[in-house]
Amino acid sequence: MSTGKYKPKLYNSTEAESARTGALKWLNFKDWGLRVEGRLSQDLLCCTRSLERAMTENTTVEAQRLEATRHRQAHWRRWGPYLSDRQWGTVREDYSASGAAWDYFTHDQARSRAYRWGEDGIAGISDNHQRLCFAIALWNGNDAILKERLFGLTGKEGNHGEDVKEYYFYLDNTPTHSYMKCLYKYPHQAFPYEQLVAENACRGRDQLEFELLETGIFDEERYFDVLVEYAKAAPEDILMRITITNRGPEAQTLHLLPTLWFRNTWSWSKGSGSEKQACPSLPNSDKPLLSKAKSKDKDNYSVIAASHSSLGDYWLYCDPPTALLFTENETNTERVFGTPNVSAYLKDGINNYVVQGEQTAVNPELVGTKAAAHYILQVQAGKTQTIQLRLNQVAPALVTASPLGAEFERVFSDRQQEADEFYQRVCCFTRSPDLQNIQRQAFAGLLWSKQFYYYVVDEWLKNAPAEPSVSPERLKGRNSEWIHLFNDDILSMPDKWEYPWFAAWDLAFHVIPIAMIDPELAKYQLDRLTREWYMHPNGQLPAYEWAFGDVNPPVHAWAAWRIYKIEQKLYGRADSVFLERVFQKLLLNFTWWVNRKDAAGNNVFQGGFLGLDNIGVFDRSSELPTGGRIDQSDGTSWMGMYSLHMLAIALELSKSNPIYEDIASKFFEHFLYIAEAMNRMGRQEASLWDEADGFYYDVLHFPDGHQVRLKVRSIVGLIPLFAVETIEAELLEQFPGFWKRTEWFIRNRPDLTQNIACMKRQGVGDRRLLAIVYRDKLRRILEKMLDEKEFLSPYGIRALSRYHAEHPYIFEAQGQEHRVDYEPAESTSALFGGNSNWRGPIWFPINFLLIESLQKFHHYLGDDFKVECPTGSGQWMNLWEVASEISQRLIKIFTQDAAGRRPVYGDTEKFQTHPHWQDLILFYEYFHGDNGAGIGASHQTGWTALIAKLIQQVEEHED
């Protein structure tokens, strides 16, 4: 009986030689006459070697590309989907004194105003320092502007904060970006910009958002499917295929403008608005140039030449367009600021030429820093047209046959097949076609969400382009304490439109599914975050660009440990160098937490909102209306979890360096003090554990010394479950010094060990357990967590108990009522911008950690320890089965039910029933606590890509 596992093809000697000959045929571009001094280029030689290894080893071609990249034999990641989906409205582009980023640089200005710190576009790519960019632009003949970038509402315009109002789908991507696919749906009629703004402005926070489908713009399928695909023939040779399908009932005209441009690095100088150098990473750079190049075959293709002082020379080969259009990527100062333009050709020149018919808006000399191939396509109803392009470093003089000829399709076919083989191997346990589709799109979204992130805070603070001077408020305002921060990297974004900036705790969850397909990338992300040009000199990790000094949960030791173990399991590599490097930096961060976030010095931690936005009855990051402080159940539990993962890493490093054994003992001691504080404060302190309720709560300390438990049943009381770790018996035998010090604490400090799981008892397999929560408390917490009237939803664990639907928590302070109600969908509060909600919905990162914690408890307690699941059902499960049950409920959010409907799409019929929509998956930020519908940011892959890991775990266990 087949297990469904992928079995890679192994070649015999004759097949291998035949395949090698065929591979060399396309690798040396013989079909279109490329000759480079009579030999293959180094990149092509690397391609050849990778393919040969894949044919003779138990691996895939894509895996070999990753190996070549890992060993620095080829730079397959130089080009990728590194454009943002939104650069306007970001902190980086904001030079206002007030820090009003959404207002300072708007969507309306974006077509006319040059960006400084990054670029955006639709389904676009760039090199890894975003010097040269490519994306598509579209015009349906009805819009008032070219569709060059995605539209959405700002934080002030949306009734639930910022929100993209477009339909685009990341369908495929490989770790080296050897194959990528993205779909954008573009209406025939004028895009309803004003209607979307006006209707959402009329809606209150108690109403649903007004979505693009509700405007009727897609009725009768009156839209184009614009499918953008990329395939790499070599690291510096990128094939592009744009397929336009008219889904509507009538023929329609579409203007397609594949656009190539340079990021503006020449218009900025330190200390003034008239500039010379903007990019410290590109010193002494000259202004780059795009120009029309001569081609040998004018009938078959046109060519745009791109020359950059540090990137080198590239050529974009295009199917014959109606025209090539050139302008400059420079600000239209007259339109944006009301001041005379310096240049005759501006960023919005192509827009003005196509949409407004301004013939003088583009450069007749066919040179500039922004260029587009203009195609005017008449697409019949239900029909498709395709445009091909190719970007590489092969000069037209070296081409003897068309770069867009027969070999073009062959390369695309090969890359698609190799992508299939790669994911079949990675996801070898996933048998259901529906699950395969979900998992594949989750990985695609994760990889498409990589972005070039450039931000030099010191320079940003001191240099304000277009402003007469730098305001004193700005120099002392946002991020002014982070002048060391110098970001110039490819980083994983939560959502490249809604959150086009790295977020420290989000990133820790991104790296888990990334590690399944590209552990080097996962390690790189954590390594960057802990480097000295990111981490504050005091040890704090930067949170996100809106406020680098905000405090997020300390989950990075957990993430580092998980990456290490995933790579070890899936790829057979134990990268102790990575583990040790990150561990050393996390020692600084742990010390920062201990010194800064334990106000009373009693091992109970604060930390503020800790990524959970509106979870509390008060804004925990601001001054309390009561005065005093809050001892946080979640903050303290996170630190317990932090201690345990630092302990686990220290023991692993002790295998090669005994000095870490002492450090492991120190983290064991830290954990004991934190766990004891969670469960039994001193006589003068209220415990975070409420014995009567069988639950953990935050404790409010008033200035006069009295204390009150804030009895909100939320995930704040579940997070203590995360602080759990098992230690194998053989590991204790390997480190007798650590075990001796552990036994001393058990014997001599019963005050620290009596209320927790502290390794005193042996479990299954003689394992030992460290946990804040042990048997009795565990049962009581799970009784609530697994109650469908409280936390357990048909689609996972809610962030707030449904108990509060009928029993809101109300607290009065200074004559004002503060309350927490169960809200399973969007927030009705403006707290933290109102665009996220932790008072009822389902969040993947918390659910993932709960599942993992239950698995660890099962690893120690075994099959005999059972709880009722769901509570009151009469059905008893061990903790592994409970973890599997929660996993299945989460997966059910995305899968089709018996009627073919996906809970993620709620009542949106187009997504539920239409064949051109129903298999397109969006990975939302969070999900409705009762019906599983997606809410918040719609491309949060991001941490919702954890679904790919959950599918793998569940399918592997079932197999």
Image (spheres, rainbow, N blue to C red):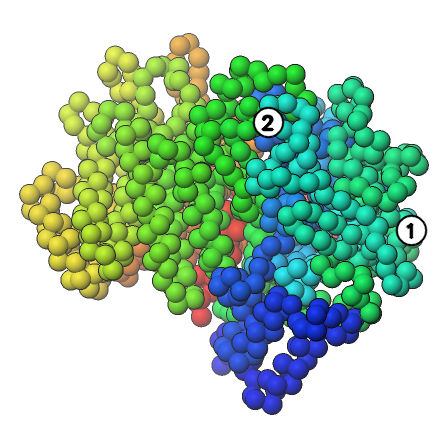
Q: Give residue 322's mark.
A: 1
Residue 886 vs residue 380, the one in the foreground: 380
Q: Give residue 923's mark.
A: none
Q: Which residue is farthest left?
A: 748
Residue at 28% x, 36% y: name it: 591
In the rendered image, the quadrant that contains the C terminus is bottom left
Q: Is residue 107 above or below residue 82?
A: above
Q: Alpha-carbon neighbours of circle 2 within 10 Å: few (<14), some, or many (≥20)?
A: some
What amino acid type should be assigned to the residue bearing mark 1? Thr
Residue at 15% x, 53% y: name it: 738
Residue at 20% x, 56% y: name it: 658
Residue 16 vs residue 643, the one in the foreground: 16
What amino acid type should be assigned to the residue bearing mark 2? Lys
Q: In which quarter of the image is residue 151?
A: top right
Q: Nearer the viewer, mark 1 or mark 2?
A: 2
Q: Return the residue at label 2.
A: 270
Earlier along the polypeptide chain: callout 1 or callout 2? Answer: 2
Q: Is residue 296 above or below residue 678?
A: below
Q: Position of residue 656 (x, y in %)?
A: 25, 60
Residue 18 vs residue 570, the one in the foreground: 18
Q: Is residue 735 above or below residue 680?
A: below
Residue 68 vs residue 43, the one in the foreground: 43
Element under label 2?
Answer: loop
Q: Is residue 732 visible?
A: yes
Residue at 50% x, 78% y: name it: 57
Q: Where is residue 403 in the image (x, y as percent from the top left)?
A: 79, 65
**Label tally:** 2
